[in-house]
Image: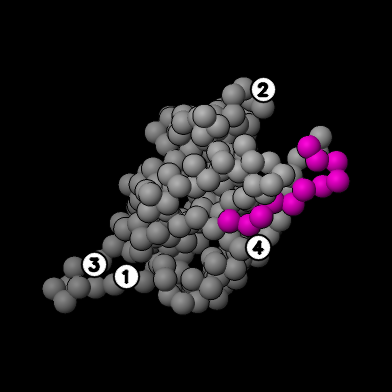
Amino acid sequence: MAGLIFAYFEEGEIAPLRLALFIDAQNTYRGARTSFFNDYGPSVDGQFDPAKMGELIESRGGPIGVECTLTEVRTYTGRPDPRRDPKTYAAHMKQSGKWLSDGVNVIHRELRYPRGWPTERAQEKGIDTALAIDFVTMAVDGLYDIGVIVSTDTDLIPALEFVRSRFVGERHVVVAAWRSRNSRRRLSIPGANIWCHWLDRDDYDLVADTTNYNR
């Protein structure tokens, strides 16, 4: 708990720290498939519920068991082009609508389609940048005490480094990642002890979303 600042009520009680969750949706989905399934299974394998993930992380507290209150779940996702791929777009909008109805803040960027599409996959562009900017600006604006990034995208490390070094004693950076026999990847900063919420298969089952949004 060293280095964290607590808010106090007038009675002297310690107020829970505000926790915000930043989820890289596609990276987290792919990570779940790699950790617990395979790429040949149905598309629902690896799907997760961001709101339930937020509740799970909140229940575990902050670093070293610090009590915290979940204030926001932010999910970053690529959005298909309704003209190029109307079926995938419709499924995406159903899924995004579910997330929004659960109180999740959905931030999207349009997918980029290569010349070889559909043989080549459409690509996400700008998702990691959007997440990194929000993680930093929300720290600057004082909108969270604990910021949790759910992703293994190393492009996000500079954002972790900035918040950790710039707001010592004010903000705490945390990561979350899947863990299995097949995978144990997480974001880290060389020479720094960054708290990680490891999520195993039992945790995945708690937050899994088995809805087929293509129907």
- Which dot marks residue 14? 3
Q: Is residue 207 magenta?
A: no
Q: Who comes first in sequence, dot 3 or dot 1? A: 1
Q: Which residues are magenta?
A: 108-118
Q: Single out the mark in the foreground, 1 or 4.
A: 4
- Are the residues flagged by discs 3 and 1 in contact, CB closer than 8 Å? yes
Residue 92, placed above or below residue 72:
above
Residue of label 2:
40
Q: Is residue 115 magenta?
A: yes
Residue type at mark 3?
Ile
CA gap between label 2 and label 3 equals 49 Å
Residue type at mark 2?
Tyr
Determine the image quadrant of residue 4.
bottom left
Q: Position of residue 11 (x, y in %)?
A: 13, 73
Label 4 crowd bin: few (<14), some (14–19), many (20+), radius 10 Å: few
Residue of label 4:
129
Q: Single out the mark in the foreground, 2 or 3.
A: 2
Instruction: Point out the residue furthest to the top here.
Output: 41
The residue positioned 48% from the left and 38% from the top of the image is 48
Residue type at mark 1?
Phe
CA gap between label 1 and label 2 equals 47 Å
